[in-house]
Amino acid sequence: MKHEAVEKNIGLLAFFMVIAVSIGGLTQIVPLFFQDVTNKPVEGMKPRPALELEGRDIFIANGCVSCHSQMIRPFRAETERYGHYSVAGESVWDHPFLWGSKRTGPDLARVGGRYSDDWQRAHLYNPRNVVPESKMPAYPFLVENKLDGKDTAKKMEVLRTLGVPYTDEDIAGAKDAVKGKTEMDALVAYLQGLGTIIKSKR
């Protein structure tokens, strides 16, 4: 069959494109589902505590993932700046994953423990108080918004159905764990928990 015949026949061209993409997908994507490194959690990893789980939802709700990735690529320039490259086992319990696709701000995959809680609070309250050239918006309202925890246990139950190993005790104590806390407390707890399983020198 001549190339010209395929290129001029849209239906035939589309058919062969679907075949080519299907074969490529089967050979590249399907094997990943059977590799332990992509679907088993990193050794020592534990499910996020209730406060961190609420913080993650606040991170999503305020659009932080639009400007901050959580995926350090295995390139020297990135590992020297951010730390150990990201591995799939760190994200197996993330629903949805927050790898991101844009870095207006720095990558946050290993930000946990890099700064103090007070620094994080000051930065979230008004970034320019800490980093004068920052383009990040301020989030002073996080200090005022209290968590009620009414949905925290339900979130954990849903995540458990997706494979996150929350215990009955975790779920039962979820509401009390966030009681009296603010959205700022939750977001700082989430940030301080990011990337602390795998440690390496920057």
Image (spheres, helix red, strand yellow):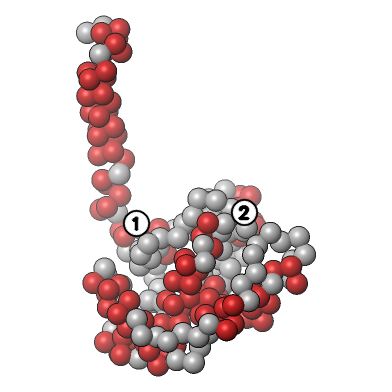
Residue holding disc 2? 104
Marked residue nearer the N-terminal end (1 or 2):
1
Picture quarter with the N terminus: top left
Q: Amino acid at mark 1?
A: Thr
Q: Position of residue 177 (x, y in %)?
A: 42, 90
59, above or below 167, in the image:
above
Q: Amino acid at mark 2?
A: Thr
Q: Nearer the viewer, residue 1 or 7?
A: 7
- Which residue extends farthest right? 132
Q: Nearer the viewer, residue 140 or 14?
A: 140
Q: How far apart are labels 1 and 2 at the CA level?
A: 28 Å
Residue at 30%, 44% in the rendered image: 29
Report whether residue 159 is seen.
Answer: yes
Report whether residue 41 is seen.
Answer: no
Residue at 25%, 53% in the rendered image: 34
Secondary structure of the residue carrying numbered label 2: loop
Please give the label number shown on residue 38.
1
Please give the label number shown on residue 194.
none
